[in-house]
Image (cartoon, rainbow, N blue to C red):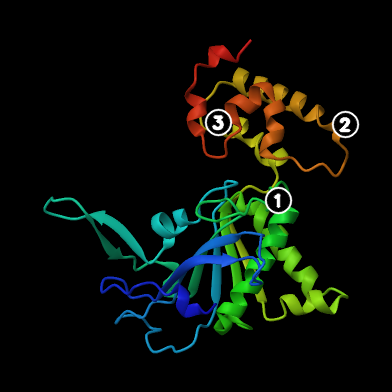
Amino acid sequence: MKSSDYRMEERADISNEMYSGYMPLSLKEDNDEGAFFFWLVKQSRAVDSPHREDTKPKQLLVWLNGGPGCTSLLGLIMEHGPFTVEDKKGGGGGFTFLRNKYAWSEEADVIYVEQPIRTGFSLASQNARKIKKEKQVAHDFSKFLQSMMEVFPEYQDIPLFIAGESYAGFYIPWISQHILQLQHSQSEQDRAALASVDLRGVAIGNGAIDYAIQEPSYAEYAYYHGLIPLTAKERLEEEWNRCMDSFQGEGSEHILTVGDFDKCDLMGKVCISLYVFRCFAMPWSTIII
């Protein structure tokens, strides 16, 4: 397996080399761990790009959307990828690509990764385990990086940055910690696995970091922005505290997840989503005693 196997057809309206496909978590023939779908965008070589004459990559940025289970192609197509997609003018159907001059690939090679396994186009064999913990996410991502560095050796020993949003606020710290732990392991085999990975930094935007802190802030935010009355705010806070009390028996190492909030009656129904501010438009007579 070599990088040219993933090369995408060039387009006159896109000034980036692009590669995409399935990267196995193990390059061994008997791999049954699954494969991540990725879309790699090389740095722009447009006529007006200051990096037009660069011959080697200077840095690699990994982008992860959240979810959990959200496609990272959202970042590629709708946020900071090298192009935008618009309907063709004049009718007749179809679409056209337009260069995004504000794309992150103007300054770095960017790889959009569909993970964990079973996310988006990523594949899992029947024998592959179900992902239930961030520790598993971190383990699989380190395997992906190991395969990636072997297939694309030009990224060995150059600065690597991992960025993402939303639930990637959980993914990124676990992944980064796991990379550093392997690189500083007493095991020579562990150190060798990611020896060529030069992790320089991380970036998390609008991240889910700690539900116990972040979720109850919705009631306060809604009240101070005139979306709900004080009685609703107080009722939500009471219900939230009741919900948190239900976790006291879980132990001090229990990590709150989206699934935990199914136990939160009112707060879970009204403000569980990190995105759904429209929940505050519901009739407040239904929650105010």
77 lies left or right of 126? left
Tell me, for residue 238, which label it has, or none. none
Task: Name the residue located 80 percent from the left edge and 74 percent from the top edge.
Answer: 190
Work out how far the residue at label 3 is from the one at label 2, CA to CA, in angstroms.
30 Å
Work out how far the residue at label 1 is from the one at label 2, CA to CA, in angstroms.
28 Å
Splitting the image into 4 quarters, where does residue 162 fall? bottom right
Towards the viewer: 119 or 63 = 119
Image x and y of residue 38, in percent: 51, 64
Amino acid type, label 1: Arg
Image x and y of residue 62, in percent: 56, 66
> Which SS class for mark 2?
helix
CA neighbours of label 1 inside 10 A, class few (<14), some (14 to 19), many (20+): few
Towards the viewer: 163 or 238 = 163
Splitting the image into 4 quarters, where does residue 197 fall? bottom right
**Quadrant in which the N terminus is drawn:** bottom right
Towards the viewer: 79 or 29 = 29
Image x and y of residue 36, in percent: 57, 61
> Which residue is identified by label 2?
249
> Which residue is identified by label 3?
222
> Which residue is identified by label 1?
129
Q: How many marks?
A: 3
Work out how far the residue at label 3 is from the one at label 1, CA to CA, in angstroms.
40 Å
187 lies left or right of 178? right
Amino acid type, label 3: Ala
206 lies left or right of 87? right
Which callout, 3 or 1, points at the residue further toward the start of the chain?
1
Towards the viewer: 71 or 282 = 71
Establish if 141 lies above or below 206: below
